Image: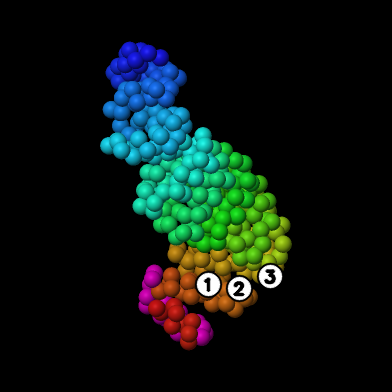
Amino acid sequence: MSRNEIIEVGKNLRWELNPLRRRAALGRLLEGMNKENAMLVRDQVVHFSPESNEFQDFHFAWGAMLGVEAVEIGADTKEKDMAATMMGWASLDPVGALSWYDSLEEDRSNCSDVTFGMLKGLASSDLAFATDFAVRKLEAEDQRAGEMLGLVKDKMLEVETLPRAAAWALELPEGKVRNDTLRDVTGEFVKREPKEAANWAAGLDGEEGVEIKKLVAAKWAQEDPAGCLEWAQRLPDGPGKNASIGEVVLEWTGQDPDAVYEFLNGMSDTSERDAAVEAFSSRISGDDPHSAIAWADEIQDSESRRTAMIRAGRALMRQNAEEGRQWLQRSGLTEDVRREIEK
């Protein structure tokens, strides 16, 4: 592509209002770009906003073509082009880009444009590389690590299957960032494929398994409480099953309290019923604290009953303090529970 052709197409690109024709003009410039004319092509797009597709796409292509040379030139320009240029290089040559990045002095490697351009480039090429890069930042206690893993998570959800994205989140290092990421991935999994998400959650053990099951139940029950309840009741006996049933009841009560009432009355006295009754009592306590108190009194487990009674009692006190005090006097509750209610 000759110099005159580049300048002519650049004029069309600059003044063209039709987005399709403008995109075609940019495509011609990028197709005709080589190492010798890249700076002239850059002159045709540098006036665009750094956030524009034209500016971003050129610098991505420039970085992919020239690698470290383009990045080093970008370090000396006044425009905000480092992130897009770095992204282009890292997407085409992740090993070379990582090696260069690791050789930087700390002040330059901490530059957000370089770091996030590096990450986005890796994420568009190799998610394993991108994950390792973000995890390194997490282990170095970089405050940007959560945002970085969030970018990888979004890409993972875009291009990978949901079971693979969930497995990826589980493999992250323990801590708040992992928990937040796992919660986000689980939520998206339930939104798109609730039954598959439920089957996945059913296979998770320990406290984390309980929390994931609760999250699945809470989200799935918003759309299909009956289907979610059927799944929860098939879970192995234990905290995960109880917590899941409780979450279903919380959501279901908001949709059809009469149906929940019948469901509870048909249950035998088990830990599952305790969890369901505690959830029902909690959900109705704001509107009907007297009924919430009556239901709380049916809970067999002493600690769960105490928690539910305190919650319902406080709701009554907020609704009518004098009536609440009179109820407390004749409630027969222990002194410590009464003090908790009166707080």
Q: CA distance from mark 1 to mark 2?
A: 8 Å
Percent of width and height locating residue 191: 56, 45
Query: Which residue lies at the image location 45% right of the left edge and 60% below the top edge?
Result: 141
Amino acid type at circle 1 is Ala
Asked whether residue 320 appears in the rendered view, the answer is yes
Query: Which residue lies at the image location 30% right of the left edge and 20% below the top edge?
Result: 14
Q: Is residue 130 above or below residue 281?
A: above
Q: What residue did someone put label 2 on?
A: 299
Quarter of the picture containing the N terminus is top left
Q: What residue did someone put label 1 on?
A: 308
Write down the quadrant of residue 326 in the picture.
bottom left
Amino acid type at circle 3 is Thr
Dots 1, 2 in contact, CB < 8 A: yes
Quarter of the picture containing the C terminus is bottom left
Reply yes or no: does residue 278 show up in magenta. Answer: no
Dots 2, 3 in contact, CB < 8 A: no
Reply yes or no: does residue 329 show up in magenta. Answer: yes
- The 10 Å Cα crowd at callout 3, few under 14, some 14 to 19, many 20 or more, is few
Helix, strand or loop at label 1? It is: helix
In the rendered structure, find residue 288 and report the number of the disc placed on it.
none
Q: Name the residue nearer the viewer: 73 or 199.
A: 73
In the rendered structure, find residue 270 and report the number of the disc placed on it.
3
Q: Kindly report the secondary structure that dominates the magenta region of the rendered protein.
A: helix
Percent of width and height locating residue 53: 38, 29
Asked whether residue 60 appears in the rendered view, the answer is no
Percent of width and height locating residue 31: 45, 19
Q: Which residues are magenta?
A: 318-334
